[in-house]
Amino acid sequence: MAVTRADVVVLGGGFAGLSCATALAERGARVVVLEKKPHLGGRAYSFHDPRAQETVDNGQHLFMACYRETLRFLERIGTRDKIRFSENARVAYADASGRRTLLDCPAWPAPFNLAAGVARLGGLSWGDRFGLWRLGAWFRQNGAGPLPAELDRLSVRAWLDGLGQSRRLQERLFEPIAIGALNERPERASALGLAQVLREVFFGDPGASRLGVATVGLSELYAGQARAFVEARGGRVVTGARSTSVSVDGGARVDTERSGRFEAEAVVSALPPNALASLELPPGVRGRWDGLAFAPIVGINLWLDRPVFEGPLLGLLGTEVHWAFNKNDLWDKRGDGQYLSLVISGAHAHVEKSPSELFELASGDLARCLPEFSRARVLRWTVVKEPQATISPVPGSDALRPGFATASPRFFLAGDWTQTGLPATIESAVASGHSCAALIAHLEMKKATLES
């Protein structure tokens, strides 16, 4: 069996694994990244659709100005300029009756940023808007330090109802945020995740709520550049390498099916919990995290003969499809037609449907929200399903999320599902990767001090 030596082995080539690997490589470590798929990107990647002759993301992602760790990672690998941010948190919505409204929150200090946006948001009475001050009072009381643990025992719906947020305000403001950030319906999702998001986005630094979009496909945004960064510093990135076991007796060791054995001082798992659970692991590493469940996302991509809306994205209200992204705007594509990427989050009721059923569903939603769609011709379409897109943040799930350190001082856990203080987002994934890299660097520095 071929044996490869390294300082650190990272399992998984998504945002968590690659952010960890590049941070370690930047500190001078020789890193090996093992990815079981034939390509990098984990659960956030893009591919070439031969029928459409287009790049397709496996799921559309939004970035936020408060994604500090993600922006630090992209700055490190040289692709920070591939994210375009809006001046304000500005989102247009269309409902199932064809009515349009706009949420436009200026980069003002909290709570005036959100209040200004809601003041101009259509379909709300002044009584609906007044409820926002009760939410602001709650964050003034709970804005610093850890959020109350009881939030993880409440659903988003129960928490907002308890704070006197009207159903109309929930439907037009909080539900789109919850579904987009938590990948679950407000009746199913834990209130803790929404509170974490709202604190970061609207009750933190002014300007944190600005939306960012990738101007290239996800893989082009980070996968190849991260690989080049690691390999330029003496590391290796191996795809098609399925790990089978991890041992930490007398040093860390990872065995793979066909790529040999990898020995190192430490191992970082950046695998999702189900993939990690399938490995032979050191004693004491397994924990309650194997009880975490998943939530699916469905993406429907349409190529139309004409534009049906302007701007980068559109939130859909009262429909099964939640978001429509205008790839022509995002990727600065010229031409007469339009490339749309549609998203159904928390798609438990839809993930088992056939592609043709999902196409009909999406077409019906667009026809109700966008009168222009009925005049357009669909030239091509494709469906992408991610049955295990994120962990399902149901009440009680936060208590199952593990920390970065484990019972073994040589084995660490990264991933959007670990205990980052954030929902399972790209920012959570990158924050976990950076945290694991910092822990390893600290232990190596402490070891060097003791040996000197």
Image (tube, helix red, strand yellow):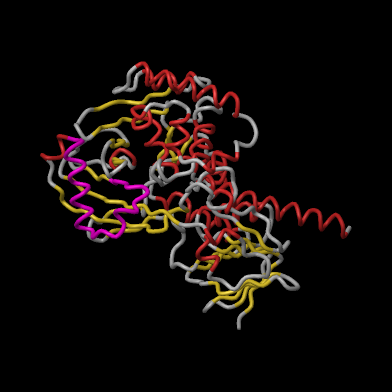
Q: How many marks?
A: 0
Residue displayed at 54% across by 22% down = 137
x%, y% of residue 399?
59, 50
Between residue 389 and residue 41, name the one nearer to us. Answer: 389
Residue 41, can we see it? no
Between residue 323 and residue 257, name the one nearer to us. Answer: 323
Between residue 129 and residue 321, name the one nearer to us. Answer: 129
Q: Is residue 121 magenta?
A: no
State left or right for residue 3 relative to residue 305: right
Residue displayed at 82% across by 57% down = 448
x%, y% of residue 20?
60, 54
Q: Is residue 362 magenta?
A: yes
Residue closest to the far bottom: 1
Residue displayed at 45% across by 36% down = 158
Residue displayed at 65% across by 34% down = 145
Quadrant in which the C terminus appears: bottom right
Q: Please determine whether, in this image, residue 244 is positioned above or below residue 331.
A: below
Q: Where are the magenta residues, as a range?
A: 341-370
Q: Please determine whether, in this image, residue 324 is positioned above or below residue 387.
A: above
Q: Please determine whether, in this image, residue 295 is positioned above or below residue 5.
A: above
Between residue 276 and residue 149, name the one nearer to us. Answer: 149
Quadrant in which the N terminus appears: bottom right
Residue closest to the far top: 126
